[in-house]
Amino acid sequence: MSNLDMFNAYNEALIAGDFEAVFKTMADDIIWHQPGKNKLSGKIVGKEVLGAHLASFGASTNGTFRVLTNWVSR
């Protein structure tokens, strides 16, 4: 799979809210940097830890968290 194919698979799954498919595009030892200066920001290491971290977004926002993207690839 090319880098572009991988990006498109990630992006399409993200837009669809299919986080199982999103996580299939990630390495087990992913390093995720969440910007900001709040309880959700920081460096997250590992796919399982990231899953729990992202799941906390829903709880922290009373279920209003949504992913919006305007990425385009060619």
Image: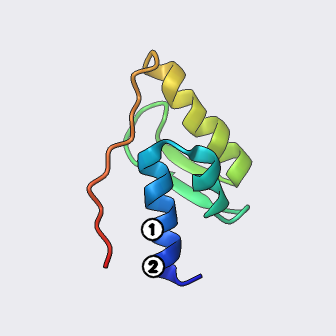
Residue 34 appears in the picture as rendered: no
Residue name at image x 63 percent, y 63 percent: 26
Instruction: Find residue 53 and report its horizontal and vertical position in percent.
Output: 60, 37
> Label 1: few (<14), some or many (≥20) within 10 Å?
some
Helix, strand, or loop for circle 2? Answer: helix
**Contact, mark 2 vs mark 1 (Cβ under 8 Å):** yes
The Cα atoms of the two marked residues, 2 and 1, are separated by 6 Å
> Label 2: few (<14), some or many (≥20) within 10 Å?
few
Label annotation for residue 4: 2
Instruction: Find residue 37 and report its horizontal and vertical position in percent.
Output: 38, 38
Q: Mark 1 highlights which residue?
A: 8
Of all residues shown, which one is farthest toward the bottom?
Answer: 2
Amino acid type, mark 2: Leu
Label annotation for residue 61: none
**Depicted 70 relative to depicted 16: above or below:** below
Residue name at image x 46 percent, y 19 percent: 63
**Depicted 22 relative to depicted 55: above or below:** below
